[in-house]
């Protein structure tokens, strides 16, 4: 008969003890390292354009659809508007975006691409293939990882039961 498992006792898998708190078993650790290192791959590609990775994400959203209200950009990027505001100010100072009161709702601010911001898209189109090359992974494999992460993100947003 096995002893009851206590909070500090390791789980047993296939007869071997499994430490549930082992660092390399943690999803959060793998995600944190992957995030830092993948963003690090982007850094040298974005620097010539004067963009940080968060600014690049803003530009991606606007290249997809513009103008957008600040709240819409924040929602697409899963950011708080207060976090987004400094990014937009910097992009505006760089001449990539323009912020104006939304004519349909004076309380809202609409963000649009400037001519310079629209032109930047052509340079940015080189980034995805460079990232794929640098990672040395097949596009299908990267798409699968992205899809699985999207599923994970959705799971974190479900109410706890």
Image (spheres, grey):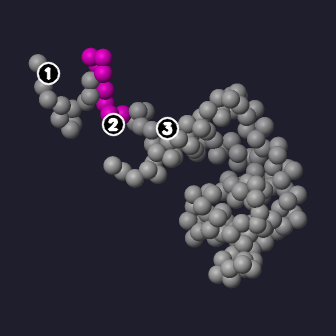
Residue depicted at x 45% and y 38%: 27
**Percent position (x, y) of residue 92?**
76, 70
Which is in the foreground here, disc 1 or disc 2? Answer: 1
Give neighbour class at mark 3: few <14, some 14-19, many 20+ (Cα, 10 Å): few
Relative to residue 109, is residue 13 drawn left or right? left
* Labelled disc at residue 2: 1
Q: Where residue 109 appears, x then y in whole percent?
A: 69, 75
Q: Secondary structure at mark 2?
A: loop
Q: How far apart, in angstroms, are the residues tagged by discs 1 and 2? A: 22 Å
- Judge the density around disc 1: few (<14), some (14-19), many (≥20) Cα neighbours within 10 Å: few
The part of the chain drawn in magenta is: 13-22
Upstream in the sequence, badge 1 or badge 2? 1
Secondary structure mostly taken by the magenta-highlighted segment of the chain: loop
> For mark 3, what is the residue?
30
Picture quadrant of residue 22: top left
C-alpha separation, residue under disc 1 versus residue under disc 3: 33 Å
- Please tell me the numbered disc located at residue 21: 2
Q: Residue furthest front?
A: 104
Disc 2 from disc 3: Cα separation: 13 Å
Horizontal relation, residue 129 to residue 31: left or right: right
Residue 104 % position (x, y): 72, 78
């Amino acid at each position: 008969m096995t002893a009851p498992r206590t909070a500090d006792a390791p789980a047993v898998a296939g007869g071997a003890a499994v430490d549930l708190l082992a660092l390399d078993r943690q999803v959060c650790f793998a995600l944190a390292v992957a995030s830092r290192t993948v963003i690090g791959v982007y850094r040298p590609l974005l620097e010539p354009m004067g963009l940080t990775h968060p600014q690049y994400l803003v530009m991606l959203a606007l290249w997809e659809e513009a103008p957008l209200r600040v709240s819409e950009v924040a929602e697409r990027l899963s950011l708080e508007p207060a976090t987004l505001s400094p990014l937009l100010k910097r992009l505006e100072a760089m001449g990539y975006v323009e912020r104006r009161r939304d004519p349909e709702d004076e309380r809202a601010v609409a963000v649009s691409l400037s001519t310079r911001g629209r032109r930047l898209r052509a340079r940015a189109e080189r980034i995805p293939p460079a990232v794929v090359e640098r990672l040395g992974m097949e596009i299908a494999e990267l798409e699968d990882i992205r899809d699985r992460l999207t599923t994970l993100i959705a799971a974190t947003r479900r109410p706890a039961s």
